[in-house]
Image (cartoon, coloured by chain):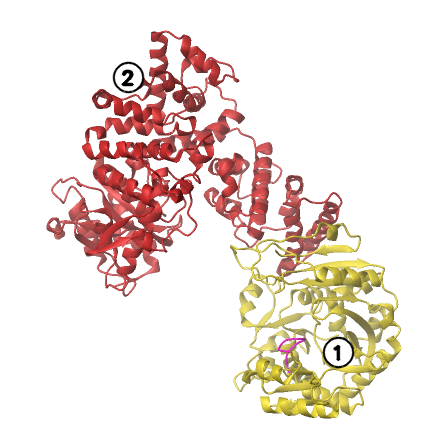
Amino acid sequence: MANGIALMGWSLPAMESAEKLDIPYVVVGYPDFQNYAEEHNIPFVGWEFKDWNENNTSLQLAEKLKPYDVDLAVPLFEETVDWAGALNSIFRDDPRLFNRSFLFRNKAMMKRKALLAGLRVGLFDEVYNTNQVHKFMDRLNQANLQLEGEEDAWVHLKPFDAAGTVGHKLLRSRKDIDDKVIEKDFPCMVESHLPGKEFSCEAFIHDGKIRFMNITEYVKLGYSNYVPCGPELEEKRPKIREVMERLVDAFGIEYGVIHPEWFLTENDDLSFGEVATRIPGGHIFELISKSYDFDAVQAMILCSDPETDEKTLEEFFPDESEFTQYHGSLMVYPKRGHITRLEVPEELEEDSYFEEHTLLPPAPHKVGDREGYGNHYGTIFFKGKDPERMKSLLTHYQGADFYV
Amino acid sequence: MSIPQTAPEKIISQLHRSLSALQQAPGFSKNMYMPSVMAAVHRLAETEQGIEYLYEIIGELYDADLFTEGPWEDPQALVPSLVSGTLKSGGETTNMEILSELRMLAIANGLIKDGRCSSSEARDFLHEVLANNLDFVFPDRSEESRSIDPETWVKIRSLFSILLEHLPFKGIKANLLEEIQMITAQRPIITNRVTKILEFIHNELELDRAVPEEQALENLVNARYAPTDYLQSREGSYNEEKYRSFLEEADDDTLMEECQQMGQSLVNTGIGSKWHVYLLEKVVDRPFLVKEVLALNKSGRTEYDNHREMAEGLISTILDPALSRCLYGAGRMLERNLLSHQPVKSALKRLFKLQLHPAVEENIFRSTTAHHMKNPEARRMLIADTLCILGQPLGIGQGWNPTCQSARGISLWSQHAPGKLLRKIITAASENNLSMRFEEELIESDDLVLGLAKDFDYHLDIVSIVLVPHLDKIYNEMMRRCSLRQEDGHKWVNPALYGQWIPTGFISAYDVTTHAIKDYRNFVRVFYATHHPDYNGENDLTYPNPVGIFITSATGKLLGFHAVSILRVDRDEDQMRVYFLNPNNEGRQSWGGEITPTVAGHGEEHGESSLPFYQFASRLYAFHYHQSEARDLEAISEEKVTQVEEIARNSWGESYIWT
């Protein structure tokens, strides 16, 4: 076991899980959290993850962490991934760890690596101005043998280093390029539209081997998903496992969690979307924890630690086919411009699949701060045995207005 | 929306699940479980049964440290007068406030032991909350139009019905007695609040005449429900027909006795009742009896005789149970001999046949008074409150509107220019417009859009409803025209708005260009030299002086500016005090620190507030004065000035730079 771990990013659930593991830890978080940490006796080092310059280097961070005797850094959020990589490089005296972390922070580099490994990816390029985006679309149209009057090929524009759908723009036409793309987007990556059904995988890796792999069914990207996936995807588990292993090998990942997104086409082809190494969004870890009855954050810590022994891992993870029931979540965002109150449909609470919700009434006069309540307005959790019903509930309530 | 029959179980199990997670969680991560707990609390708070359930498990919520690290943490630090505003604010704030009251209730009933707050303290707290929020206990029709969203309104009503059900009333009586005495001491024109308290006592409490304070309470309740011995001897279901037939058969002695007792009750409390109205209907053509019912003093009686026809006409016009609150004011108006003042008499005559502008009528019908009237007639209501304003110039209140300027203007004109006031009422009521001159230019309210009041509160007297929207806009426009000047605009606006009574000298401690406090010691000296009898040659103040004060919170922090009028400066026992009008409906409003104005017990007339001179000085930031009187500034000792300056610097002064 590691002497102590640095939790990279401020996450209360992660702290709670670490506490239960009984490993000494220190939280590396934005300096804003300093007061809260002091009040609650949380070992804390304040750090600006967004600045990386000669006055803010990993060596300095490692120095600040010395008193805590940590020898492992676990990245919890996107912007801490490279910092964690740098720290682990120092702790293990292995410079390649740091370089590897960059694979996750630069989507173009990530794609190239996947391409080299023989994974199926879309056509992609790095672009530095609007003109290059037009050129990219031209080449795509050309390849698609576009005739006069036919629609343009869809192009996705993504920042190199943002989590999930942050900064993602879908460009359906040349006009879209002119209307939506702004100077600040550059440099960034563009790629062709990948057809198929999107889903994610969460693989817990130790010593280069996948110890546990979950497949998450996406009902609507950014809104709703459930764990484990329905039978249709489950059937493809061996195939998915195969590409996952290829990804792990290609990226040289030895320890930790990866959370890639894949596209499954009708003729069973799997395309690689992108991959992250941090706690996934959309409450996926909570859903895994509930469905498989283990603490996913603890699993992440254990797998990140090279010192964890085989026995511990074996006892920790259940069989991938042994889950209690399906657990799903729906994140609720207010739809209307002006909202006045919360209205939860009666039939939701009466539904046998309804587990709980965290929908709070909007507060026109806010009193006190409400740190850590998240940025969507709340989440509805479902659980049940029938994946089809789960999917239809998530679809149904995704269309409901909870704030009117 | 009601909770479906089957749903509470799920919500309740969510609540218990997240509560136990919260309880087991280390201190730093308790926050994480709050959304789940509070979402369940929100759903339960939507019905009375839900709140009842929350009360049942409040011990568990308390043990789970739900209140820790928030504004509700320490029950001892909570302020009863803030409860209402917090409850109304909606959303999660309302939910936490409801839980906080339930915790108090549990402490009061011994279900929770809290080291910081004893059960009797909790009870006192809730008694005060109840006394402050009788609107929630007894909503009247006008509540429907209030601005709380319906969902929050239902929650608050349910909370109060549970408080009433579970709260031991022992001890509430002393609270209520003081509350009523302090309100009636101010003789407000709008008496909704006090009548609501009386209604509560009448309906909910048993009073024991052997206990002095309960006897005092009963006398007050009787002023509203049975103002004479005869009525007190009747059974509960006594009604107006029975009383009318009693009066029909009563001989002159009995009638006289009835009238005298009614009059005593009216003048002792300022509270009229429907019984006064029934009695007056019977005797209105017999002046010697009317004078008794209105409890007129000698000059009032003479006035009545001199203007019998007019007086009788006015009294008959306002006879309506919903206007019974105006009888006290009508009597005091007669005592001021205002009918002998030709401009007033002529204007009142005009009011009788005045054609009201439809928009004005519409506004009048939004008033609480109209909601209580069976067949509301705008003109009658306007006449009734015109009499009140004339009879009780210090009884005016601004309601929830930020229109202290307009209210104190109406009060000043009632005292010193009643003819001018009536002229304004007539113009505004018939034309829905008002014009005033400002620096040789005419300002018409009709041309203006903006006033200070955004959502106008109509829980006001009818004169205010008619005048304030116009005065507010005109005042705002005058201030706008001064906004780029180097000095506080009130220097020019006050004399223009209020009239020639305002002295031309003006001094402000607040520099509008630098936002700093400048030359404060001199400012204090000028105030002492011109207003303190020891320094100004024992001179009385001739007219009310509109002054600006800093309002601070109970902890002395600056909240903002407020307008009051100094009425007089006088000695009470060994202390020199400033007597003033605070138009904000509550002359007892705390000004922070130890500075709490009183409304009785220090020589105050009805409607006056007072403070020791130095305390008043320490909150002042601007006032008018006669330059010729600001002479011997050095006569005021350094110590006196320092005393004031220290209080100022340690309260609102902390928010400013001093130069």
Magenta span: A161-168
Instruction: Answer whether residue B323 is magenta in the image.
Output: no
> Total number of numbered labels?
2
Both labels 1 and 2 in a single chain: no
**Is B600 on the left-hand or right-hand side of B630?**
right
**Screen quadrant of the N terminus of chain A:** bottom right
Q: Hey, what amino acid is under mark 1? A: Pro
Residue A202: % across, % down: 77, 74
**Any idea which chain is the red one in this picture?**
B
Q: Hey, what amino acid is under mark 2? A: Pro
Name the residue rendered at 53%, 87% in the picture: A54
Q: Which of these two is toward me, B364 or B123? A: B364
Residue count near mark 2 (Cα–Cα under 10 Å), binned few <14, some 14–19, many ≥20: some
Q: Main secondary structure of the magenta part?
A: loop
Residue A263: % across, % down: 78, 78
Q: Is residue B565 visible?
A: yes
The circle drawn on residue B287 is: 2
Residue B348: % across, % down: 27, 33
Instruction: Report in which chain the residue with disc 1 lies.
Output: A
Residue count near mark 1 (Cα–Cα under 10 Å), binned few <14, some 14–19, many ≥20: some
**Any idea which chain is the yellow one in this picture?**
A
Name the residue carrying label 1. A260
Query: Mark 1 and mark 2: span between their CA atoms?
Result: 96 Å
